[in-house]
Structures are given as structure tokens and as C-alpha cells.
Image (cartoon, rainbow, N blue to C red):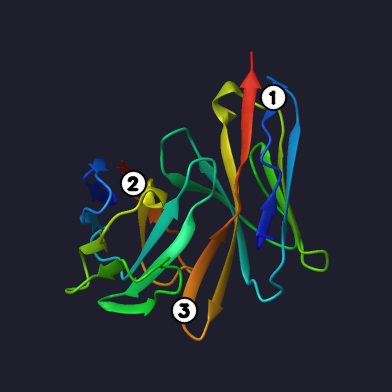
Amino acid sequence: RKEVEQDPGPFNVPEGATVAFNCTYSNSASQSFFWYRQDCRKEPKLLMSVYSSGNEDGRFTAQLNRASQYISLLIRDSKLSDSATYLCVVFREVRGAQKLVFGQGTRLTINP
Amino acid sequence: GAGVSQSPRYKVAKRGQDVALRCDPISGHVSLFWYQQALGQGPEFLTYFQNEAQLDKSGLPSDRFFAERPEGSVSTLKIQRTQQEDSAVYLCASSLAGALSYEQYFGPGTRLTVT
């Protein structure tokens, strides 16, 4: 079982729709949580950090549930430019060694 | 400004050849990370440097993989006696300090194909 699990999709949704992705992580020592975006044949880029209190950045809302070890991302009023792979990422540090652990990614296509 | 750069962008190697992949991090970034990304998968951690010190190499898949950062800036990932299963995109990332406090900036990657 992978440490960070995501539904790989693909998700195909019409422009303007709301779409939600979920992610679960197995290591309770995970300290910080992120969503990264990766366009086809490009490098990953940080989309947003995720906090227990929930955080919003424009059309994007991220939420963390530590008790359930569950992370979510909500995209409202989706745009064609939102088409990408969304990577759920957890950070942990063990004896000074720092590591980002990535999920498989969820592929999203927004259709006109 | 200049981001993380990697070279070569594409590399085709015959099975058994040695390859060297280079990463130039953002100037002044203390931390440097290498990841391996297979097709359809997320990046998998390989190794982590803080300045010239390699603090974690637990992700290196075998002793054929070796990474160095001798002067605390440019890093090289070397793969000896390449195998077909080594075919992947190798991503380098750097951050100002530790991965927790600062965003990791990724380079464009080197796409390695072993034939």
C-alpha cells in the first residue's frame, strides 16, 4: 500500500463545474501537507499548502482532517486552464532527514 | 530570474551504459532533492542534500545510483550500468532551507530512456 493514496482518475468535467479530489495518507508522523500541480511533460509546482483549519485561494479550497488522515482539494468554477495532474504531497522529517512523499496524482481534464 | 536547470533534458542510453545527470539549483538554495518519476506516477524521493552533506539517500533504488554535491551548489546524479527499469524522468528540486519551511522549486527534469 502506498503511503499517499489518490484516485488517479481521469476526471473529465465541463467548464464551470465544481470538482473535488481526495487523498489519504498512512503515516501519522506526517507533519505538513500540500497540493502540487503538474502539467503534461512539465515539472510539479506548488498549488497550495493545506491546514486543519482549511484554506482558500481564489477558486481553490484545501482541507485537512488529521484524525482521518485525509486531505481534500475543491476547485470551483473550473476553467480550461485547470486541466492538469494534481499531486497530493505530505512532508515528514525523521532525525534531520526531510522528505516530501507524493501521491500518484489525479488527472483532471476540463472540457469546453 | 533563473530557476532550477537540469541537463541534459533528454538522454537515451543503451543498457549497461553509465549516465550522469546534472542539476543547477537556484543560487543560494541550501537544500537540494532528487526524485524519480515513472510514467503515470508521482515523483519518488531519491536523495536529499543540505549544502554538500547528503543527509538522506534512503530512496536510491540500488548501489548503481550515486549522487554528489561537492561544493554545495551543482549536483550530479550518476547511474551505473543502466537497466531498462531506470527509464524515468529524474527531477531535481531546491529550496531555500528545509523542505518544511520553504517551497521546493523543481527543474524541468531529465527524461532518461534505456534501450
Residue B42: x, y in percent? 53, 49
Question: In the rendered image, is residue B2 in sight?
Answer: no
Question: In the rendered image, is residue A61 in sight?
Answer: yes
Q: In this view, does A25 lie to the left or right of B9?
A: right
Q: Nearer the viewer, residue B28 or A66?
A: A66
Chain under numbered label 3: A
Chain under numbered label 2: B
Label 2, secondary structure: give it.
loop
| Residue drawn at point x = 23 percent, y = 64 percent | B75
Under mark 3, the amino acid is Ala
Give residue A29's quadrant in the image: bottom right
Q: Mark 2 points at which residue?
A: B109
The crowd level at tag 1 (other Cα within 10 Å; few <14, some 14-19, many 20+) is: few
Q: Name the residue under label 1.
A: A12
Pick out the residue farthest to the bottom: A95
Q: Determine whether B90 is above or below B61 in the image.
A: above
Q: Do labels 2 and 3 share a chain?
A: no
Q: Are marks 1 and 2 on the same chain?
A: no
| Residue drawn at point x = 23 percent, y = 70 percent | B69
Chain under numbered label 1: A
Pick out the residue farthest to the front: B16
The crowd level at tag 2 (other Cα within 10 Å; few <14, some 14-19, many 20+) is: many
| Residue drawn at point x = 24 percent, y = 45 percent | B13
In the picture, the disc for residue A97 is 3
Q: Determine whether A53 is above or below A10 in the image.
A: below
Under mark 1, the amino acid is Asn
Under mark 2, the amino acid is Gly
Work out how far the residue at label 2 is from the one at label 3, CA to CA, in angstroms.
23 Å
Give residue B61's quadrant in the image: bottom left
| Residue drawn at point x = 42 percent, y = 65 percent | B46
Residue B68: x, y in percent? 24, 70
Label 1, secondary structure: give it.
strand
